[in-house]
Image (cartoon, helix red, strand yellow):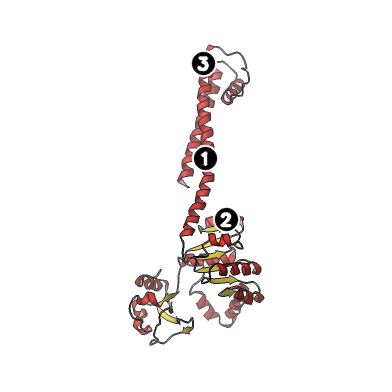
Amino acid sequence: MNPLIKFFRTKIYTAFFLLAVILLIGILGYKFISDYSWVDAIYMTVITLTTVGFGEVVPLDYNSKIFTIFLILASVVIMGYALSIITEYILSKNNLEELKYKKMQKEINSLKNHVVICGYGRNGKQAAIKLLTHKKSFVVIEKNRDMEERLRLDNVPYIIGNANEDDVLMQAGVDRASNFISALPNDADNLFVVLSTRQINKNINIISRASNESSYDKLKFAGANNVILPDKIGGDHMASLVVVPGLMEFLDNLSIVGKSSINVEEVAVEKLFSRQKVKTIKDLDLRKKTGCTIIGYKDENGEYIVNPEAELELATNSKIIVLGRPEQIKALNSAYNIE
């Protein structure tokens, strides 16, 4: 629980305790000092504490008047204290929510080269889980306010708003982001968001979801670098489990969305060589140093080579793809300070 809320709740409990005490004192006082019945004692105490101005049940004697004066003065102080605490608690709770939003927006404003996820449905949430696994900073844009509770429980930074509006995209830092994932269920919405994002940031890498194959070319034309068809991928995957079941099960266990273990890593050549002269794959000797095996190479032009030769020279702005057990990948990241 937030310390501020806990503090105010403690004060509220104190206020209610004081109200209960003064109410009990009033009832007992009228019962035994004025010799009222229990009902009359409760009645006199309530009208005295609330200062409604009704008359006494019976005329008060000297002792009863002195007691009533004490009760009125005490109740004014306690009631005033209780009302101020309750009001302060309500206002502070609203202010606390506002402070949370401001704090989260401040964190979002500080992000750079992050990922923006548009939509927090099935695909958007899975993307967020994967990014958390790889410790990548990201922001979620979600239009449906009913999803806010889930976003809070998942402890992810978010913005409630319509991604079709440029102001919302700017609020999420699209102009500073390195990647954008549009995971909206409607292809038309994805198309509009991709188009808007590309206009704001010419260099951002855009990945969009598509439900229909007919939307593929349109999304690519709008500026998406990659278009994912979840239904097609799911169907291909199921068919592959029939054709080459052993291979697919092996590939599934390499790096599964939602699991903390990572078996495949993509590493920029610059991180491996630092300021040294570019060398060959053989010179890296990653197998001996970390236990990882190089299974792929992406050159500076974006072309992939599967199972590259040991004598292949590594060019600047290229990447290698390595395979290993989680502890081997961790050793690789530690050895070369890869985040």
Residue nearer the viewer, 106 or 293 = 106
In whole angstroms, how far apart are the C-alphas of marks 3 and 2? 57 Å
- Kind of residue at disc 2: Glu
What is the tally of numbered marks visible in this picture?
A: 3
**Label 3 residue SS:** helix
**Label 2 residue SS:** helix
- Kind of residue at disc 1: Tyr
Q: Is residue 71 above or below residue 337?
A: above
| Badge 3 or badge 2: first in the primary sequence | 3
Residue assigned mark 3: 66
Instruction: Give residue 30's quadrant in the image.
Output: top right
- The C terminus: image quadrant: bottom left
**Label 1 residue SS:** helix
Residue nearer the viewer, 166 or 206 = 166
Residue assigned mark 2: 148
Q: Residue furthest top?
A: 62
Q: Is residue 270 above or below residue 138?
A: below
* 10 Å crowding of disc 2: few (<14), some (14-19), many (20+): some
The spot of residue 32 in percent (x, y) is 54, 17
Residue 89: which numbered mark, if any? 1
* 10 Å crowding of disc 1: few (<14), some (14-19), many (20+): some
Residue located 58% across and 71% down the image: 208
Residue located 51% across and 47% down the image: 96
In whole angstroms, how far apart are the C-alphas of marks 2 and 1? 23 Å
Residue 69: which numbered mark, if any? none
- Kind of residue at disc 3: Ile
Q: Are marks 1 and 3 in contact (CB under 8 Å)?
A: no
The spot of residue 165 in percent (x, y) is 60, 61
The spot of residue 264 in percent (x, y) is 45, 75
| Badge 2 or badge 1: first in the primary sequence | 1
